[in-house]
Image (cartoon, helix red, strand yellow):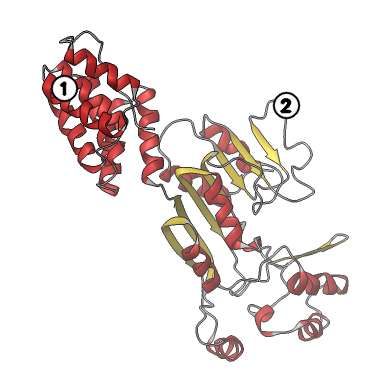
Amino acid sequence: MEIAQYQINGIEKLLEFLPAGDKNILEIGSDLDCCVLERLTGVYGGSVIGLNPSGDFPRKGSVKNDSRFYALRSDGCDLPFKDKSFDAILSIATLEHVGDLDKFLAECNRVLKPRGVFYTKFSPIWSCGIGHHVFAVVGHKEARFWKPGKNPLPDFSHLIWGPDEMRTFLHSGPCDDRLIEPIISWVYNSKDINRRFLEEYISAFRKSPLKQRVFNLITLYSPPEAIRAQLQAKYGTNHDFSCQGIEAAFFRRVSVEELNKQGEDLFVKGKIQEAYDTFTEVIEMDPGFSQAYNNIGVLLCESGDMQKAMEYFEKALDINPNDRDTVLNFGRVLTFMDKGEDAKKLFSSYLYKSPGDEEISQLLNDIEGKNQKAKVMSCNYDG
């Protein structure tokens, strides 16, 4: 089976939110033939994993010996992955089937890395004209909401009628009689659709730990006035019945601690400018986060700008005077810059509160012994 255009569009939209480079991608609600997974492996150099709870997933023959993706039979509300495992999550034509939206979104947040992106596009939602999402097959006969001539239900009928009214209508001849009970069972009892209104999606997204960046409503048509009156009489006037689907993009919120750790990882990898920018962002998020000032001081030490480094160490100690790493870093820079008396005061003040610190005691002894440059200077990150 070939990949559909709406699936290609979903992949392309995800690309817009991802920076270049190898990424670990999770697709939740993979198609049975793994078409999206196959396409994703041609786009990304990282790992690609897809999951679907269906007993038919993956369809026989869809995963070949040379396939570079992994297909798992699992539920999006109970993801079998460690925290912060993925750079991105893609979910196409899936959320209309998810019963526990709060748990689903919480799981996405859990397995995403800080700043990881979750992109989704799905339809039809229950509160639109074809929200019954009808799928019924008996022998060679089928009812499908999206196939021309295969949907026997009038728009919005699933919201207005009860089972008996729908049964009466279907017996009037719009479909093979063998499909009637399977259709009614699907519309009113199937666990494969969640029967949520637009406003419930909006509420779930707002409560989610994820940070919403994009939210677009896919609107094809509104109900005729006569139908709207019936819908409002039954459900109230606070519902929008014109929205067929939703496109949304979310990012995992990042704490200053996580962002600071990202900066440290970047520094270890030799990405100095990216690390500097990250620590600067930490300070913008929380001007009282002393570790970021210390870490910028370390970067400046590495680049040879000792004077500027001292300014950042001073800022860090203004916030947290007892931070051991900053005391060590600042004291070593002061010693290196022939400011031994200042370093001596710094170390003495720290040892007054923490007298058992042997390393700082030795540094103080070196200064008092006028051995100010005997040691090779090095700097430490916090934590």
Give the answer, above or below, for where 338 lies relative to 153.
Answer: above
Give the quadrant of the C terminus: top left
Secondary element at image label 1: helix
**Amino acid, disc 2:** Asn
Q: In the rendered view of the protein, which quadrant contains the N terminus? A: top right
Distance between the Cα atoms at labels 1 and 2?
Answer: 61 Å
Q: Which of disc 2 and disc 1 is earlier in sequence?
A: 2
In the image, taking residue 45 as reference, residue 347 lies left or right, namely left
Other-residue count near label 2 (Cα within 10 Å), few / some / many at <14 / 14–19 / ≥20? few
Q: Amino acid at mark 1?
A: Leu
Q: Quadrant of residue 227?
A: bottom right
Percent position (x, y) of residue 211?
A: 43, 55
Query: Residue 181: horizontal and vertical position, in percent?
Result: 84, 74
Q: In front here: 22 or 16?
A: 22
Query: Where is residue 112 drawn, in percent x and y?
Result: 51, 44
* Residue 249 locus on image (x, y percent): 46, 54
Front in this rendered view, residue 138 or 283: 283
SS at mark 2 in the image: loop
State left or right for residue 166 relative to residue 159.
right
Which residue in the structure is indicated by mark 2? 65
In this view, 331 is above or below 212: above
Out of 99 and 129, give the one closest to the viewer: 99
Report the residue marked by disc 1.
Answer: 334
